[in-house]
Amino acid sequence: MEQSQFQEKVTYFKENMPKECPITYSMKIIGSKWKIPILWHLLLEDGQHYNELKRTVGGITNTMLTKSLRELEADGLVRRHNYETVPPSVTYHLTELGKNISDTLGELFEWGKKLQAHQSTDN
Amino acid sequence: MEQSQFQEKVTYFKENMPKECPITYSMKIIGSKWKIPILWHLLLEDGQHYNELKRTVGGITNTMLTKSLRELEADGLVRRHNYETVPPSVTYHLTELGKNISDTLGELFEWGKKLQAHQSTDN
DNA sequence: CGGAATCCTCAACGATACTG
DNA sequence: CAGTATCGTTGAGGATTCCG
């Protein structure tokens, strides 16, 4: 990265900081263990059922899946659609705000690849 | 976001996924409580001393500051410079890999602002 | 099928004191 | 100044069982 471009970004950060840091806030929303995996698998395939999501995410318990989904819903990232049938059928969908996270995940993806490349070249 | 652009990104994710997901890996490296605040304050001012960093980050204990810095160093994001003087003087610097995270933080910043805007308009 | 209710464990984190 | 050493705490997350 160019130095000038880097300093530009830092200056932008300094000048646009609200009361609560948006970065800290983002981490509060998606920082817990299963949030990103859930969002990720909804990005890959939207509208999954509860047990379908449980299978694709993999390794998550009912407790945590339900808790995470409820929080994501309350934060406006996920919408829950209940078909009101017997037996029950429920699907989970990303909201626009939820889909917006793909840019962030994209950067985490790119930076993570650099990290992994670095890890394998040293030590 | 356009739908086509969104699908393009998802397809790119699917096709470029290594054994360990780079996103999960990124979160493992910077996901603990103080990593991002530390990196953040080193972005704002590089080469801070231990106690200086402790003050600017704010609220962090010696235990956690030391532990976090050691891990960031081991992961190649931070370089520790010891002046070998009496009394001791040590400064902490971002590596290139560490500076690279500014793009990711930039996205977390932008998305966080959208989240905050959303939170204040509903409920 | 899509959860809710309970109980339990551990590891992240904090508080405090001390040191070369 | 830049840490280390110990101990204490808490809450995120896991395991299990049950339910309409």
Image (tube, coloured by chain):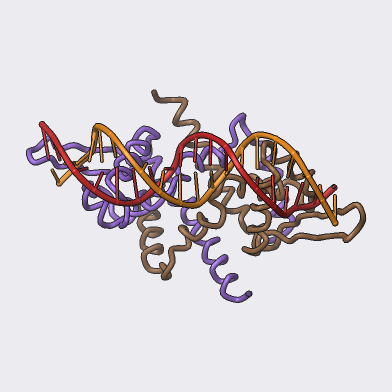
Chain colours: A purple, B brown, C orange, D red
Where residue B97 appears, as percent x and y from the top left, is 65, 62
Where residue B103 appears, as percent x and y from the top left, is 59, 53
Residue with the most extreme left position: A86
Residue A119 relative to residue B59: left or right: left
Residue name at image x 63 percent, y 74 percent:
A123
Residue with the most extreme right position: B86
Query: Which corner quadrant of the image does residue B98 belong to?
Result: bottom right
In front of the other: A51 or A103: A51
Residue name at image x 56 percent, y 71 percent:
A117
In front of the other: C3 or B95: C3
Where residue B57 appears, as percent x and y from the top left, is 69, 41
Badge count: 0
**Looking at the picture, does residue A97 appear above or below residue B105?**
above
Residue name at image x 40 percent, y 64 percent:
B12
Residue B27 relative to residue A14: left or right: left
Residue name at image x 22 percent, y 44 percent:
A91
Where residue A103 appears, as percent x and y from the top left, is 47, 51
Residue D1 relative to residue D18: left or right: right
User: Dividing the image into 4 quarters, which one contains the C terminus of chain B?
Assistant: top left
**Looking at the picture, does residue A84 appear above or below residue C18?**
above
